Image (cartoon, rainbow, N blue to C red):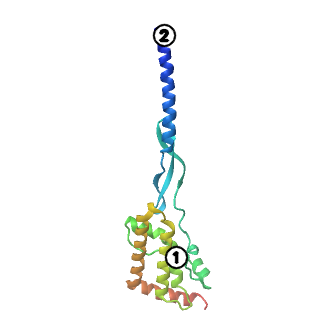
């Protein structure tokens, strides 16, 4: 057997070995490509699928990003609602104005936007003219915020986010209970309803 024949056999053997190794690595790595965590709206954690890319011998993003879902965006999606004749007039008059939290830190700004549907529903409740109390409206507000936290931040990966959200809910509710401005707002809102809505 001459040198050229030996070199040809070695080349074929080496090419075969590389193909087998590549196929083996491809199968092994494909099974080992885990989903990776990704950031979703309002700090929630979701997952991104990954697939094996044999040409680069690495995993890469593939498929859609999976987030917990969409949180409510309107007061009408709240599980606890105030339903009375003047609601439409209040909404058309642009009386619900979201959350009044004046803090500017990133967490406060995020929850101010996240809790907006619950805040709008709370504004509507304050303007309810069928004998509701401030305490009842504040308690309903807390239930709506808690429902938003539990409904959006679900799964083990969002445990810390849910705890943070529930803590923000407590802060918002406690502030309403003790702030003199909240009592004044309730009185003003009741007066607005008396002036603008028929009983």
- Contact flag, marks 2 and 1 (Cβ < 8 Å): no
Give me the C-alpha separation between circle 2 and circle 1: 84 Å
| Foreground pick, 90 / 54 | 54
At x 47%, y 7%, the residue is: 2
Q: Is residue 180 above or below residue 12?
A: below
Q: Is residue 136 above or below residue 68?
A: below
Query: Residue 100 appears at what percent x and percent y?
Result: 44, 75
Q: In this view, does 47 lie above or below 52?
A: below
Name the residue furthest top: 2
Identify the disc placed on residue 4: 2
Q: How crowded is mark 1: few (under 14 residues within 10 Å), some or many (20 or more)?
A: many
At x 57%, y 81%, the residue is: 90
| Foreground pick, 177 / 191 | 177
Identify the disc placed on residue 149: none
Query: Residue 29 appears at what percent x and percent y?
Result: 48, 41
Query: Dot 1: what SS?
Result: helix
Identify the disc placed on residue 120: 1
Instruction: Indicate the quadrant where residue 184 lies.
Output: bottom left
Mark yes or no: residue 165 visible: yes
At x 45%, y 70%, the residue is: 112
Mark yes or no: residue 97 visible: no
Q: How many labels does the image show?
A: 2
Query: Residue 199 appears at what percent x and percent y?
Result: 60, 91
Q: Which of marks 2 and 1 is in front?
A: 2
At x 50%, y 85%, the residue is: 189
| Foreground pick, 81 / 191 | 81
């Amino acid at each position: 057997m001459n040198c050229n024949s030996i070199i040809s056999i070695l080349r074929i053997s080496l090419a075969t070995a590389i193909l087998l190794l590549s196929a083996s690595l491809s199968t092994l790595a494909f099974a080992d490509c885990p989903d990776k965590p990704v950031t979703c709206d309002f700090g929630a954690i979701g997952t991104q699928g990954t697939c094996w890319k044999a040409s680069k011998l690495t995993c890469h993003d593939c498929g859609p990003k999976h987030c917990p879902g969409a949180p409510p965006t309107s007061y009408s999606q709240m599980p606890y609602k105030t339903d009375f004749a003047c609601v439409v007039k209040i909404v058309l008059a642009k009386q619900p104005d979201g959350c009044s939290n004046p803090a500017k830190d990133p967490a406060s700004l995020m929850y101010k936007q996240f809790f907006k549907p619950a805040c709008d529903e709370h504004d509507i409740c304050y303007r309810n003219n069928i004998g509701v109390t401030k305490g009842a409206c504040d308690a309903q507000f807390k239930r709506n915020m808690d429902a938003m936290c539990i409904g959006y931040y679900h799964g083990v990966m969002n445990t810390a986010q849910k705890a943070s959200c529930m803590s923000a809910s407590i802060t918002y509710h406690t502030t309403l209970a003790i702030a003199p401005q909240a009592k004044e707002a309730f009185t003003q809102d009741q007066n607005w309803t008396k002036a603008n809505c028929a009983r």
